Amino acid sequence: MSGFYWIASYPKSGNTWVRLALSALIHADTPSPSMNGSRFAPNASRRSDIEDGLDVETGDLTPDEVRALRPAAYRALAQTSKHPLFRKVHDAWSATETEGPLFPPEATLGTIHIVRDPRDVAVSWAHFAAIDVDAAIAILCDPSTIIRPHPPRVALTVPQWLSCWSGHARSWMDAPGRPGCLLRYEDLLADPATALARIATYAGIPHDETRIRNAIDATRFDALRRQEAEHGFNGGQAPGRAFFRAGRSGDWRHLLSDEQVERICTTHREMMQRLGYNESGCS
Amino acid sequence: MPIHDHTLCGWRVASSLPLPDLLPWTGDDRAPDLIVNVGAVPERLDDPTIDLPLLQIDANGTCRFAMPGVATYLIDPTGHRVIVEPVLPADAPDIRVFLLGTVFGILCYRRGLLPLHASCVRVGGGAVALAGASGIGKSTLAASLLRRGHMILADDVTVIDTSDPAGPRVLPGFPRLKLWRDAMDRLQLSPAGLERTRSELAKFHVPVAEGFCAQPLPLTAVFHLDPDTLPPGGTLRRLRGPEAVVRVERDLYRRGTMVKMGLSAQALGSAVAVVGVPGGTWLVPHRHEPGGLEDSIAGILERLTA
């Protein structure tokens, strides 16, 4: 009997970097796999995971059955695993209609929750999905957003219930059980060593200063971008788009119009204040 | 209760549940190899060693699999007897979907056979498995190869007998494909008159009829369809040694169930036998984008004729 560490974030908020850095830290003693070879912390909505937990083909289930049975799948995987399981999650924390929380507290060891300024998320998402910024902002403001793979993409995941940016952040911050390890993307960028050490301590991953430094060095943004340029990286981005784009915070200041900034601030003001994203730009 | 006389993997199947997916038995008058009965399944097994919401396994190896709202299935430890307690009407296709899915997988493992998560077609005189995760496009690829004249041995679950000293053999399943509506549209197949796999899903049972190969054939090659291989549109790569074995294990049908049944060592032995097939095992960078299917078919056929 073990359980899950959920690496939970809204999309485009640093989840991939955290997973790569944790993978580098955990596998510090073995030759580091390339970022493509690393299967550390796969998506919790991956069909193969849910099928292993449920002993059934997800393609034979209705969408309602998949949603209702996901908690049972996670409980089963936790029950039969001897080691902590790390999973990336973009779903909001929520309760299913009949089967309790989607991410059952009794199968949860902890949550690493990453947040990012929604104005930068909008810029990043627009680049990632090859959509215009207004379309990205509309997604960030829509509480009914569900991520599902669209043909011709291969559908290896089940639908992910995202909520809007505020709803997503609130859902994980207010989730019952052990309080999450909350990190801001901006703080990860400013001081990655401290952030990674915090996560490692929270998740019980052995570490010391050298190991942390090596993991950070192996996953520096320029290194990841170089690997992507050389070997490619499939992070679900639109064809022809780089997954590792800029790795900066604050791009919104010169890429969003005042009106676009205002639209984000109006919808998300309360959560932006709660997370310290109100220092400038929002009137 | 009428007994339906069918065949599956060369077994004689006597079933009180109608199984229209399966071909009728045309062999000798041997006793059935598999008996499927409609009957009462206990609410839970006594003292299960695996106790999950859908699956229970007891110390003797009896498995109980329950699909809420559809049916409950009880599988004996030798894989020769299944009791089905339907929730839906007994002729609902949903009941067969799970009988020929998870329950079929359990039966194979219990009988010492290796079920690969793969569709399977005949190329030349051999069977070629097209393996991969749910949603990758195994059935679509098989349907496209059928259109090019390659007969189908199995869809979704390819049963391999590794006990023959002459090498692994594929035991033919039954003459139908399961295809999503969007895949049928791409293949210009009409769903008119076809049965849905589940009443709420746009996924259909597509009969294969004369395109079905009912003879067991030697397994000549395994192609693992992989969406993550980079760069996109790259070429097929031959897998060898431990990497090949790991890949076969990853593409086992209901691998998680097999592990819970405690059969990992048995499955490993079979996987090692599979990677020794003469045509080898290959990683196919499979894409759903326009041209992806044709690229995969061209790559696969090229390797088989090389």
Image: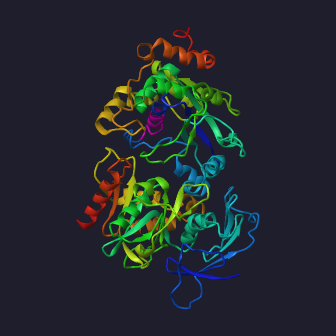
Q: Nearer the viewer, residue A209 or A245?
A: A245
- Tell me, yes or no, if residue A78 can be seen here: no
In the rendered image, the residue lying farthest to the front is: B192
Up-down relation of residue B135 to residue A279 (above or below)? below
Residue B284, position in %: x, y? 34, 55
At horizontal 74% and vertical 69% (from top left) the residue drawn is B41
The verdict on residue B25 being magenta is no
Q: Main secondary structure of the magenta part?
A: helix
The verdict on residue A26 being magenta is yes
Name the quadrant containing residue B230.
top left
Residue B278, position in %: x, y? 31, 70
At horizontal 41% and vertical 46% (from top left) the residue drawn is A152
Across the whole image, how many numbered discs are drawn on residues?
Answer: 0
At horizontal 37% and vertical 38% (from top left) the residue drawn is A233
Residue B67, position in %: x, y? 66, 60
At horizontal 54% and vertical 75% (from top left) the residue drawn is B22
In the rendered image, the residue lying farthest to the bottom is: B29
- Tell me, yes or no, if residue A55 can be seen here: yes
Residue A265, position in %: x, y? 56, 16
Up-down relation of residue A146 to residue B45 (above or below)? above
Up-down relation of residue B24 to residue A78 (above or below)? below
Range covered by the magenta-colored residues: A19-29
Up-down relation of residue B30 to residue B211 (above or below)? below
Q: How are the colours assigned in the image? A: rainbow
Quadrant of the image containing the C terminus of chain A = top right
- Whether residue A276 sits left or right of residue B188 in the image: it is right
- Whether residue B114 sits left or right of residue B142 in the image: it is right
